[in-house]
Structures are given as C-alpha cells and as structure tokens.
Amino acid sequence: MITPYCIDVPQADLDDLNDRLARTRWPNEVADAGWDYGFPLARLKELAGLWRTGYDWRTHEAALNELPQFTTEIESQNIHFVHVRSADPDALALILTHGWPGSFLEFLDVIEPLSRDFHLVIPSIPGYGFSGPTHERGWDAARVARAWAELMRRLGYDRYGAQGGDFGAGISMALGAVAPEQVVGVHVNYLPTRPDPDVELSATDEARLDKVRQLMAARPPYQALQALTPQTIGYALTDSPVAQLAWIAERFAQWTDPGSPVSDERMLTNISLYWLTATAASSARLHRDTARQAAPCPVPLGVAVFAHDITQSVRPLAERLYDIWHWSEFESGGHFAAMEVPELLAEDVREFFSRVRAQ
C-alpha cells in the first residue's frame, strides 16, 4: 500500500528544540584555534543562534509539503519518498538516492530541471528522516537497493535509471546489480577508486590517489565512530541539538566548494530533519552495516567528478571495474553536487541517460 504523506512536526518538538538550544553548555576554546581542534566555537554559536531565533521550520515544512510525498512499507520498514511525474508520459523513470549526512532535501533544486525529462522517485534511505529509524540489523546498501527495486515495481516502473552520490552512489550501483533487467543505467557523482599496480597513471591521477591515501591514513573521526560505534555517538547527537549541528555542519564546511556553498537555511533544514526524527543513530548504522568494497554494477555507468569532492575518481581504475559510458570532469562543485551546482549535475544526468536511451 502506498499512502500520501504530509510533514507535520508536533509543536512540542519544536519548543523542545528551542529550549535545548537556549540551555546549551558551551566548551571553551584556545586562542586562535581556527579549525585545528575541530569546528570553531564562534561559527557554531552563530549557527546555533540562527537555528534558535532566525530559522523557521514551519516555513520550510510548508514548502516541502508542496511536493507529492508518500510512504509505503517494505520488509517491515516504513519508506518515505517523493514522486514527481514528468509532463512527458514517455519520460524515463529515475530514482535519486542521497547519502550521509544528506537527505531527500539534497535534490530539491534538481527536481524542476530533471522532471522535464524524467519521472522522479526520491526516497529517504531506511534509517534516515521520515524513513527512520530502523529497528533491526542488516540495512546495508544492498538491502536498500532491493527495497528500491520493490518500490519501483510498486510504482509501475519496469525500466528506469538510478542516480546518487555518497552512499546514494553505492546504493544506485547495487540497484543495477539487483535489477539489471530494469535498470538501464546508473549515474554517480561519487566513485572512490583504489590503487592498482598494474595500471599506469598520469601525474594528475597519481595526485588523486595520493589524496585518497592521505584520507585513509588519517581516517576521519566521524567515519570511525559511525562505522564502529554508531550507537555510542548516537546518544550525544540525539540528546544535544548543538552536537548534531556541529556533527553535520562540519561536513558541509569541509566537503563543499567554497565557490558554491550550501546556504545556512538549507543546511539547517537538513539538520533539523535529522534532529526532529531522532535518526542520528539509525542513519549512522549504514556506515557499520555496509561493506567497504567496490560495488558491482553490470549496467552502463556514468560518472561526474567534481573538483572539490572528498576524493576524485581515477578513470583508468574505474574502467577496470565498470562499463563506463560517460565521464565528466567539473572545476566547480563538491560532495553535495545536487545542492551546490544543481544545474551542472542535472545536465550531466540528462546527457548520460540520453546516450543510454539512444543505444
């Protein structure tokens, strides 16, 4: 059964958020700390003050409720999704999947341009936002992909494409493996590539691999904690809105292109979604449950590489594993491409699937 959904956060939850923000117990900070010790105190106080007194959830809630939203139950898990039909009845269906610490909100700015050519399905990953929390083990990328295949079947789509970044990329590729007869192609804007001594690389590609090596050598604290003890960090993030704010705002500060930052309003809406649904712990479990290995993808693959992403894919290495039909390099944009440079991402998605459909 598919049921229409309307966001309606209880006022008591918003009042509680305001009260907790007002009673924040702040740590001290050494002089001239900058980013050397973590998120700067002055910037976090600025964001917390905006969240408490300058941000109106109800305004954004009303805007989100203009989207056609639905829920359905798959494998005993509630699944929330947006479903926007194109005016073109012959349009290809496209399922868009977010990552962490994003949400379905990542795709707000690509809905209009992409819906000209695609019927759009934009689900929230189980454990995230209105698809959360989860209540059992095993919701890894492959299981999410199987749920997506069932969702698309219920919606009546027997041929469709998939797109995603971050975890959404892995889930989209897994969907290609789960339903290769239905998925015509997968487009990703995040594709980590591992070194291969048998592949000769250019100086540019070697520099990209060095960046990956440095990242893996100094494993990011958020990744270690969420991959090893998501429940433990979940206590702090679920109890303190400022902890949740710092945890996610740090990622937006470090993973975006300084030339195309995500607005504070949009970021706070995304963070509010995590806070108001109490899904910090359940969303973090995806880091623990999903294996860190190359995801198989037997269908045509399109790759968009953005210059300010966490890592940049190396094409000769990717081509050893995947059937690459399309490869684009962009000088702007970062990890949250759909939010930072929506027009670039939308056009690249359109170009890839036009090529796939023409074949």
Image (spheres, grey):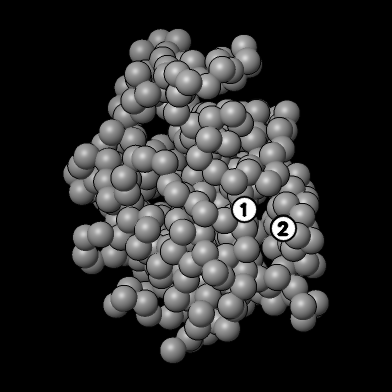
Point out which mark residue 252 bears.
none
- Residue 263's x, y, as percent? 63, 43
Q: Nearer the viewer, residue 230 or 296?
A: 296
Residue drawn 72% across the image and 58% down it: 356
Q: Residue furthest front?
A: 198
Can residue 54 be seen? no
Q: As shown in the figure, which amino acid type bears the numbered disc 1?
A: Pro
Front residue of this view, candidates 185 and 68: 185
Q: Residues within 10 Å of mark 2 (few under 14, many from 20)?
A: some
Disc 1: which residue:
300
Q: Position of residue 299 (x, y in %)?
A: 57, 56
Screen quadrant of the C terminus: bottom right
14 displayed left or right of 235: right
Disc 2 vs disc 1: Cβ atoms closer than 8 Å? yes
Label 1 Cα crowd, 10 Å radius (few <14 / some 14-19 / many 20+): many
- Residue 120 seen in the current view: yes
Q: SS of the residue at dot 2?
A: helix
Report which residue position mark 2 lands on: 356
Which residue is drawn at the image coordinates 77% and 81% (left, top)?
A: 89
Instruction: Report the side of 327 relative to 155 (left or right).
Output: right
In the image, residue 77 sits, relative to residue 47, either above or below, namely: below
Looking at the rendered image, the quarter that the N terminus falls into is bottom left
Which residue does the image show at 45% across and 23% down from the upper left? 196
Tell me the quarter of the picture where residue 306 sits.
top right
Q: Residue at x 61, y 31 (%)?
A: 315
> Which label's residue is closer to the chain start, 2 or 1?
1
Q: Is residue 11 above or below residue 248?
A: below
Q: Nearer the viewer, residue 253 or 243?
A: 253
Look at the numbered disc 1 and give the secondary structure of its residue: loop
Q: Position of residue 181 (x, y in %)?
A: 54, 69
| Count of picture labels | 2
In the image, residue 324 lies at what x, y percent? 63, 43
